[in-house]
Image: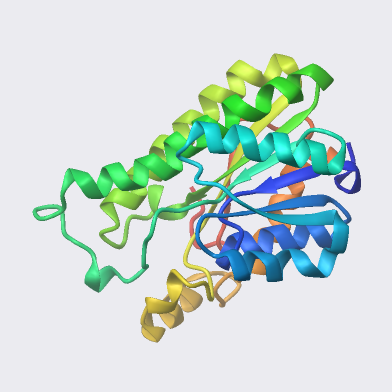
Amino acid sequence: MRIDEQVVLVTGAGRGLGAAIAAAFGREGARVVVNYRRSAEAAAAVSAPFGDRAMAMQADVTDPGAVAAMLSTAEIRFGTPVTTVVHNALSDFRFNGDDRAKIADISWADFAAQMEVSVRGALNLIQAASPAMAARGFGRIVTIGTNLFQNPVVPYHDYTAAKAALLSLTRTAAADLGPQGITVNMLSGGLLRTTDASAATPGAVFDLIAQSTPLRRVTTPEEFADAVLFFASPWSRAVTGQNLVVDGGLVRD
């Protein structure tokens, strides 16, 4: 199914990377649900350029009832079920390694908060969206990970652990849903220049990362968003259960 034939739900799309992903799909002609939890005005601004092909919708992805209601409302609005889900929502987090708790001090509550949004949110979305996808024999689920699996250079213990669990869910869901025509893949970025979450990162860190990549620059949210389009496109129809790292070549294993 072409992107311009699809209905795409992007979670956490009111700002940052999610906003860039939603805008990329809108630019390609998809009908887009711009999900947000608190950023109502920002989400409305993301959807506005695309007129009646986009809608901003509030829902907490950790609430299965809210997720189901959001998908139902989107189907009524666009006259067809959601075909692609991009799970980008992130529990409140600021990417500044100097301010993060080290392993001796971090609490389980920090891990649980990240797991709730990354993993429970993904499960709620998969369970709510996959029946309609299976009924038509087509669906695309994309999760957002991190290159810190391979390159844990900062003490983001809770964030990285939750994203690692999300990668496991991505792969097991791919095996389960593949026979129904549904692919499930992950894209993992590094530090992006710049989102609300990465705005707290010192400039020297951006410079160091830029010099460590083959491209000699830090990936932007818009560049990352373009890669997300691949997993929703017809060209990825034989790809599932994969983790594509989009970080300018910083991590290569």
The x and y percentages for residue 148 are 39, 53
Of residues 214 and 154, the one drawn nearer to the viewer in this rendering: 154
Q: How is the image coloured?
A: rainbow
Residue 27 sits in quarter: bottom right
- Whether residue 248 appears in this view of the structure is no
Whether residue 1 sits left or right of residue 174 in the image: it is: right
- Whether residue 205 appears in this view of the structure is yes
Q: Residue at left 75%, top 25%?
A: 133
Q: Is residue 125 above or below residue 200?
A: above
Of residues 15 and 228, the one drawn nearer to the viewer in this rendering: 15
Outermost residue toward the left in this view: 104
The image quadrant where one finds the N terminus is top right
Give the tally of numbered discs.
Answer: 0
Of residues 157 and 126, the one drawn nearer to the viewer in this rendering: 126
The x and y percentages for residue 213 are 52, 70
Whether residue 79 sits left or right of residue 98 in the image: it is: right
Residue 125 sits in quarter: top right
Whether residue 204 sits left or right of residue 188 in the image: it is: left
The x and y percentages for residue 154 are 29, 62
Q: Residue at left 74%, top 19%?
A: 134
Q: Is residue 243 above or below residue 34?
A: above
Q: Residue at left 46%, top 52%?
A: 146
